[in-house]
Image (cartoon, grey):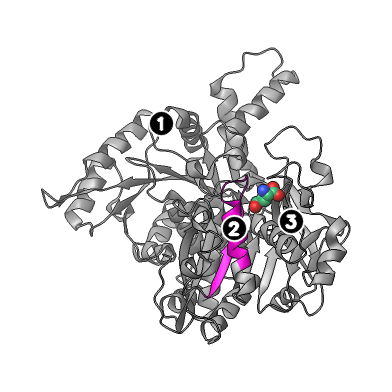
């Protein structure tokens, strides 16, 4: 391996399939294994293959698939890529998330170009070849010792069959360099007082029908697996008993790498793939983070105002950014999810009672906009730290235009076509675009920070790169009016001068960012803006001027 012996050897491919049930946490298991291998000095990347026909999740409603994660190269991807980046602190790209739609699109494009030379184009071999190409492309250079490929869906789903078939072919072609981990559920029947292995046996049988023998079983369970259960699973599923790995419910997702290490998952994998490794594994930074996360000095209450609060996966990266930054600041960040439709012009005091900071989330469309604007007015007028992200920043601009500049009915043209004051307007390059998928301003762009701004102080830099996902922007025609009245553009794109950050210097902490800082926060590198926001929110807790901020005051807005 590159990481161990110094000479380049073949990249190892690990496939992670799921059985019995969805939502068992394949993404977290894959990220945890990757973390353990990385802590042993290996170079690892993770890839997600999604069986749906959408080209990417960019056009999917968050209710269906949770948050859409955006990479530096502007790919709109599955939220599992967020876990990969947060665990590993390495960047992913479009190559790390492939969908059936993308596979078919590329095969059909080739067919139209005549590249199949008159042959019939079929699922096997053309679709499976394209799948294999997308997997192997990550291992083709000298970049990675391991490529971990997570296959979305559950074994037996019709739509994931071509992926399983591609795995079968790769196992056959490269037996020494490939391995299959099957994540399954071992349910506990309380009436019988027993853990049951039959669903796992059946799901492994199903994999075997497709010609794939798993090498490792990772068993999600609510109770400890006894030796006899482990032996039974091993015997019925043709795996070694050490390769039956228990994945018991964990307190936090960040405990999972340690639990997997206790179970020896990394060693089982390396032994099976005949990878040399030393006994040393450096998990100290990870353990430090976990210790700080679990032993905070104090707590801050943050209101997250959004329109998908029923489904917390819609704001996954924001919630995790608070976890990382909270640990770095020695604080527990207690999040209070507030539906924007609940916020009215006269109930701010009640809804935000006990809140030390207010974050208004990103989003699209008009639902809940009025509530977001009211939340921002409340934060601005009551000197409560405010953080607006993307749509949250745009709402802050609208609120300021209406209530400070006196521009009645100012709005974003996304919400209202004909507003007298379009303070947020469609970006020039978006005009005339008809396609919805992949046409936004996406991915990393540079941003120049004004000296002495909150942002510049937080980052400790005067130029940063952050990821974007939007169509609308601050309308430059109003820039001077905002500056004269105290809302400053403190972050701008160096070439186009697009406004990326706005701040109100007379307020304790009021920052709106057109970009998504949450996509870049990781365990190893908590995001500076989140840290600064949490520190300001903690200070607010001791601001005696504001009613309802006395320490220990209970909150009503959970
Ligand atoms: N809907 C807004 C836009 O397209 C904001 C997008 C977002 O919050 N990600 O500009």
Location of the C terminus (image quadrant): bottom left
Image x and y of residue 16, in percent: 44, 45
Quick one: SS at disc 1? loop
Which label lies toward us, 3 or 2?
Answer: 3
Q: Quadrant of residue 480?
A: bottom right
Asked whether residue 143 is drawn in magenta, I would say no
- Label 1, on which residue? 157
Which label lies toward us, 2 or 1?
Answer: 2
From where the camera sits, is residue 522 visible? no
Q: What is the distance, in whole Å, between disc 3 and disc 2 at their CAs?
A: 17 Å
Give whichever of 411, 72 is nearer the camera. Answer: 411
Instruction: Tell which circle, 3 or 2, labels the residue nearer the N-terminal end.
Output: 2
Q: Which residues are magenta?
A: 356-377
* For the residues bearing labels 1 and 3, Cβ distance under 8 angstroms: no
Instruction: Tell which circle, 2 or 1, labels the residue nearer the N-terminal end.
Output: 1
Give whichever of 138, 461 is nearer the camera. Answer: 461
| Numbered circle sitting on residue 408 | 3
From where the camera sits, is residue 103 visible? yes
Residue drawn at (51%, 53%) of the image: 341
Q: Residues within 10 Å of mark 2 (few under 14, many from 20)?
A: many
Query: Could you tell whether 267 is left or right of 13 in the image?
Result: left
Query: Could you tell whether 271 is left or right of 94 in the image?
Result: left
Q: Residues within 10 Å of mark 3 (few under 14, many from 20)?
A: some
Give whichever of 212, 385 is nearer the camera. Answer: 385
Q: Quadrant of residue 486?
A: bottom right
Location of the N terminus (image quadrant): bottom right
Asked whether residue 361 is drawn in magenta, I would say yes
- Label 2, on which residue? 372
Image x and y of residue 268, in percent: 39, 56
């Amino acid at each position: 391996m590159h990481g161990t012996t110094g000479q380049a050897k073949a990249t190892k491919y690990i496939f992670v399939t799921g059985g019995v049930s969805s939502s068992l946490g394949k993404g977290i298991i894959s990220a945890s294994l990757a973390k353990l291998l990385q802590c042993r000095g290996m170079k690892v990347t993770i890839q997600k293959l999604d069986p749906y026909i959408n080209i990417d999740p960019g056009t999917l409603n968050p209710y269906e698939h949770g948050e859409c994660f955006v990479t530096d190269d502007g790919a709109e991807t599955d939220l599992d890529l967020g876990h990969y980046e947060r665990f590993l602190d390495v960047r992913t790209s479009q190559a790390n998330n492939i969908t059936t739609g993308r596979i078919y699109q590329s095969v059909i494009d080739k067919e139209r170009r005549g590249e199949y030379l008159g042959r019939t184009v079929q699922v096997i071999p053309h679709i499976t070849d394209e799948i294999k190409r997308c997997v192997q492309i990550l291992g083709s250079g000298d970049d990675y010792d391991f490529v971990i490929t997570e296959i979305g869906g559950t074994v037996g789903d019709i739509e994931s069959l071509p992926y399983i078939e591609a795995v079968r072919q790769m196992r056959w072609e490269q037996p020494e360099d490939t391995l299959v981990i099957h994540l399954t559920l071992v349910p506990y029947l309380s009436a019988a007082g027993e853990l049951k292995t039959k669903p796992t046996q059946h799901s492994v049988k199903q994999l075997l029908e497709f010609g794939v023998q798993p090498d490792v079983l990772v068993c999600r369970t609510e109770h400890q697996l006894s030796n006899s259960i482990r032996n039974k699973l091993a015997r019925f599923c043709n795996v070694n008993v050490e390769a039956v790995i228990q994945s018991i419910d964990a307190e936090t997702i960040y405990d999972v790498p340690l639990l997997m290490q206790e179970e020896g998952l990394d060693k089982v994998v390396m032994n099976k793939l005949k990878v040399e490794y030393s006994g040393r594994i450096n998990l100290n930074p990870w353990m430090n983070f976990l210790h700080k996360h679990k032993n905070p000095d104090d707590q801050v209450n943050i209101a997250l105002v959004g329109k998908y609060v029923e489904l917390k996966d819609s704001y996954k990266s924001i919630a995790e950014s608070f976890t990382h930054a909270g640990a770095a600041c020695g604080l527990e960040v207690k999040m209070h999810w507030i539906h924007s439709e609940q916020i009215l012009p006269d109930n701010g005091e009640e809804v935000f009672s006990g809140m030390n900071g207010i974050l208004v989330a990103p989003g699209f469309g008009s639902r809940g906009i009025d509530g977001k604007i009211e939340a921002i007015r409340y934060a601005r007028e009551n000197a409560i730290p405010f953080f607006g992200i993307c749509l949250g920043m745009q709402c802050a601009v609208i609120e300021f235009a209406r209530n400070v500049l006196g521009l009645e009915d100012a709005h974003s043209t996304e919400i209202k076509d004909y507003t007298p004051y379009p303070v947020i307007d469609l970006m020039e390059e978006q005009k005339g675009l008809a396609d919805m998928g992949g046409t936004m301003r996406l991915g990393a762009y540079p941003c120049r920070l004004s000296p002495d701004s909150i942002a510049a102080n937080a980052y400790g830099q005067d130029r940063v790169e952050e990821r974007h996902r939007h169509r609308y922007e601050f309308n430059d025609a109003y820039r001077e009016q905002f500056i004269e009245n105290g809302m400053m553009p403190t972050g701008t794109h160096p070439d186009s001068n697009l406004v990326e950050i706005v701040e109100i210097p007379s307020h304790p902490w009021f920052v709106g960012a057109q970009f998504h800082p949450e996509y870049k926060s990781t365990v190893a590198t908590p995001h500076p803006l989140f840290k600064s926001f949490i520190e300001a929110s903690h200070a607010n807790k001791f601001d005696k001027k504001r009613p309802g901020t006395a320490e220990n005051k209970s909150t009503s807005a959970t």
